[in-house]
Amino acid sequence: TNPVKRIEGSSRNVIDPFESIVKNTFKSMQAIERNKVGLALADLAENEGAGKWIEKLAGDGKESVAKENIVTV
């Protein structure tokens, strides 16, 4: 009997670490930029007279908004 057992791995392909770093960095930067846009829209809603473009809702759930008028960033 062999006292040292052989390690068996999975059959999945090994992902290049550099490729993973680049991919994760891109996804993080994309999320950061989308968040900046959302914050800018929220700031715009606070400005007087901005109701022409964007309006902040009360958030109590009583207001109904048509689906085509909802902006998702």
Image: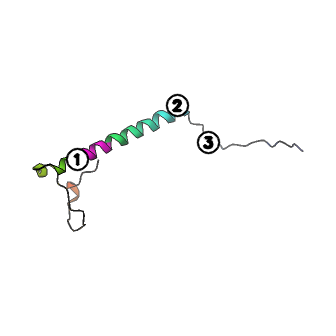
Q: Is residue 3 left or right of residue 19?
A: right
Residue 4 sits in quarter? top right
- Magenta span covers which residues? 34-42
Seen at 29% across and 42% down, the residue is: 36
Name which of mark 1 and mark 2 comes first in the sequence.
Answer: 2
- Res 59 label: none
- Res 12 label: 3
Amino acid type at circle 1 is Leu
Q: Position of residue 59 (x, y in %)?
A: 24, 62
Residue 6 sits in quarter? top right
Q: Is residue 29 left or right of residue 70?
A: right
Q: Position of residue 28 (x, y in %)?
A: 41, 40
In the picture of the structure, the residue carrying the numbered disc 1 is: 41
Alpha carbon distance from label 1 to label 2: 35 Å
Residue 22 or residue 67, whichever sits in front: 22
Q: Residue furthest right?
A: 1
Seen at 18% across and 50% down, the residue is: 45
Residue 73 or residue 41, whichever sits in front: 41
In the picture of the structure, the residue carrying the numbered disc 2 is: 18
Seen at 46% across and 33% down, the residue is: 22
Q: Nearer the viewer, mark 3 or mark 2?
A: 2
Alpha carbon distance from label 3 to label 2: 18 Å
Q: Neighbour class for label 2 at 10 Å: few (<14), some, many (≥20)?
A: few
Q: Residue furthest top?
A: 18
- What secondary structure characterizes most of the magenta part? helix
Amino acid type at circle 3 is Arg
